[in-house]
Amino acid sequence: MSMIRPDEILETIEMIDRENLDIRTITMGISLRDCCSFSGKQSRDKIYDKITRLAGNLVRSAQDIETEFGIPIINKRISVTPIALVAESSDEEDYVEYARTLDRAAAETGVDFIGGFSALVHKGYTFGDEKLIRCIPEALASTLKVCSSVNIATTRAGINMDAVAQMGRIIKETAALTTDSGGIGCAKLVVFSNVPEDNPFMAGAFHGIGEPESVINVGISGPGVVQSAIKKIPGEDFGAVAEQIKRSAFKITRIGELVAREASRRLNTQFGIVDLSLAPTPAMGDSVAHILEEMGLEKCGAPGTTAALALLNDAVKKGGAMASSYVGGLSGAFIPVSEDAGMIDAVRCGALTLEKLEAMTCVCSVGLDMIAVPGDTSAETISGIIADEAAIGMVNNKTTAVRIIPVPGMTVGDTVEFGGLLGSGPVMKVNNFGNSDFINRGGRIPAPINSMRN
């Protein structure tokens, strides 16, 4: 291994001190496949025991790494096998107790979130899937740290429109049950197309069936680092901009892999992947929108925004792929509205609309993320938004997702406060022309021709 030069050490210190570089999350994935039992109670006891045994030292190990390496680690998280797969062997009709068991285990280990109250229904439902999805609103309303996800489409299978219609209703019900906190239950629920099995980021994380017994996945951050890098080359052409972003992504990813390997060694588990997504926060200087504006846009959302985001996403992936052989998860640039100070600004001044955000999702990591909409938005309208985003993912063979919050009692222009990493956001205008006849057709939108890749 080559010697680390003093200037590289100083550069890393500057990225942490002045440019908001951090490790956004260390996520331990845990398989619960051996926790299945006909007895729901016995299954839940096994789940609690296994999570607390394997992840008991996760938070302490992460804190020790922070102290020894001087690299902030913002979140410590757990992801588990989709509970629909684990619980359907049991005699339970109501899976809410499984969510509460996950919540107790998360509290015991001290992690920030636990993901995996999930179902994969892109081609249809099993009995376990149906039970779990029906329970999502109550599960998220009665727990603090549990996150949920449902995959309703893939490039190979098409879009399950029955699930799309149901998820619109589930999101509305979840918002209603968490009215007192601005519908925050919906901030812990993601609807996916082409969901990845090794994503360390919430709310969409779960431990896929192709994953090992346990694994450490790390999600990095660093929008501030990339923005600072572009600032250093004012007026240079886009080739130079791409190279500058690649170099920054390389350095950030190397730090992420260092932390991931150290955490996996200390926890005696496998190193999985580094997700090199640029994940913003509400803090100033930590915004993906501001990176795009640094390229020359007056405001994120101006004409040229989608092209700028495409360049950013591609350059981040190229730089990260050079730094690590184990890049996975989502990897690119996130554009959550309430979690990004620049996005919030752009929405408030009218530069950024829901339709422009949808166009941007064609070229970035995920999809419509942390979007607050009026509380009276219909379930069918929400389902239509989900269907549109799923179609983008299906046709382009990429992951897309929707995390949308119909904020009870609020209307366009109001501001909802979630606090912490979830931030606050303006309630965005939604196209309310009717689509119920479309949504109520049901069935499955067939897979596109590009799904035939064998």
Image (cartoon, rainbow, N blue to C red):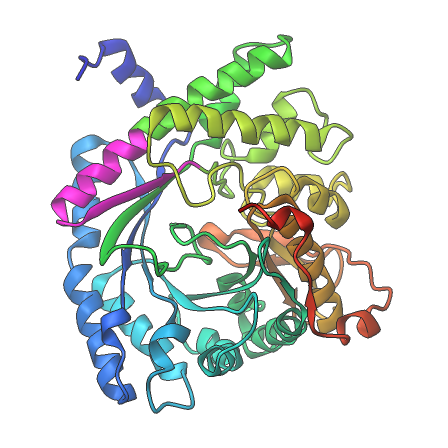
Task: Work out whether residue 299 can be spotted.
Answer: no
Task: Point out the residue furthest to the right here.
Answer: 433
Q: Position of residue 42 (x, y in %)?
A: 22, 85
| Residue shown at the point (22%, 58%) measured from the top left | 213
Q: Is residue 300 above or below residue 186?
A: above
* Residue located at (43% from left, 78% from top): 142
Q: Position of residue 402 (x, y in %)?
A: 60, 57
Which quadrant: the N terminus?
Answer: top left
The image quadrant of residue 158 is bottom right
Left or right of residue 222, residue 432 in this image: right
Tell me residue 234's x, y (percent). 60, 10
* In the image: residue 282, left or right of residue 443: left
User: Residue 105: horizontal and vertical position, in percent?
Assistant: 25, 70
Asked if residue 260 is among those painted magenta in the image, a careful observer would answer yes
Stretch of the chain drawn in magenta:
255-276
Residue lying farthest to the front in this orientation: 454
